[in-house]
Amino acid sequence: MDYTALAQELEAAYKKMRIKPTKHKYADLTHGGEMFTLHIIVTFGAPVSPGELSMECGVSTARIATALKSLEGKGYILRETDTEDRRRTLVTATDLGREISLSFEAQRRKTLENMLLELGEADALEYVRLMGRVSDIMSRMHN
């Protein structure tokens, strides 16, 4: 089997899957990873430091600082000084931020459900099985 050609075919399929920029409900948040950052803050469920966010998101602290500034300006997060260590800043989601994050996740999940529905039962099951294998393999390769 020619795995190079197969990899090139897979790359081409990935390129076709890229969603073209459109003006949708969350367009201003998906740019620059803001929605992902907000999701991580909501998922933590407790105040989190920018450094912890940086590690969890796998991006620089500068990128996190930019995302936090934007999210704070939109009223989705609050930044406060840690009462136990005044050198640290802690971030929490506002009620609006939690609502936006949960709404975005519901929309994302519905998109996946619709894609799986279009595949049909057999192909959907096979796709999920294969993606699980790919995830396992990629985890082993990068750890």
Image (cartoon, rainbow, N blue to C red):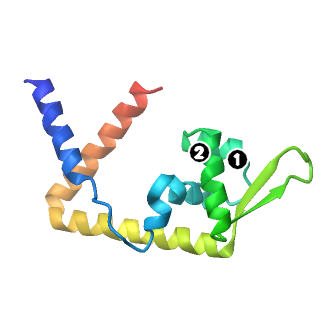
- From this view, report whether residue 20 is shown above or below residue 110: above
Name the residue located 65 percent from the left edge and 40 percent from the top edge.
61
Report the Cα–Cα distance between label 2 and label 1.
10 Å
Residue at horizontal 54%, vertical 67%?
A: 101
Image quarter for residue 130? top left
- Secondary element under disc 2, as helix, strand or loop, is helix
- Using the rendered view, name the quadrant where residue 116 is placed: bottom left
Residue 99 location, x and y as percent? 58, 75
Q: 136 or 51, which lies in front?
A: 51
Quadrant of the rendering where the N terminus is positioned: top left
Where residue 125 appears, as percent x and y from the top left, is 22, 55
The reply to whether callout 2 and callout 1 are in contact (CB within 8 Å) is no
Residue at image position (23%, 53%) is 17
Q: Is residue 121 left or right of residue 25?
A: left
Q: Which amino acid does label 2 sit on?
A: Arg
SS assignment at label 1: helix
Tell me which residue sits at (61%, 70%) in the image: 98
Q: Where is residue 102 in the image (x, y as percent from the top left)?
A: 52, 70
Q: In this figure, which residue is indicated by the disc labeled 2?
A: 63
* Depicted 63 relative to depicted 46: above or below: above
Count all numbered tags in the image, as a single digit.
Answer: 2
Q: Residue beneath label 1, please?
A: 50
For this rendering, which residue is in front, 19 or 142? 19
Is 30 on the left or on the right of 41, as rendered?
A: left
Q: What residue type is labelled 1?
A: Pro
> Which label's residue is closer to the chain start, 2 or 1?
1
Q: Where is residue 70 in the image (x, y as percent from the top left)?
A: 62, 60
On the question of residue 120 being in view, the answer is no
Q: Nearer the viewer, residue 54 or 46?
A: 54
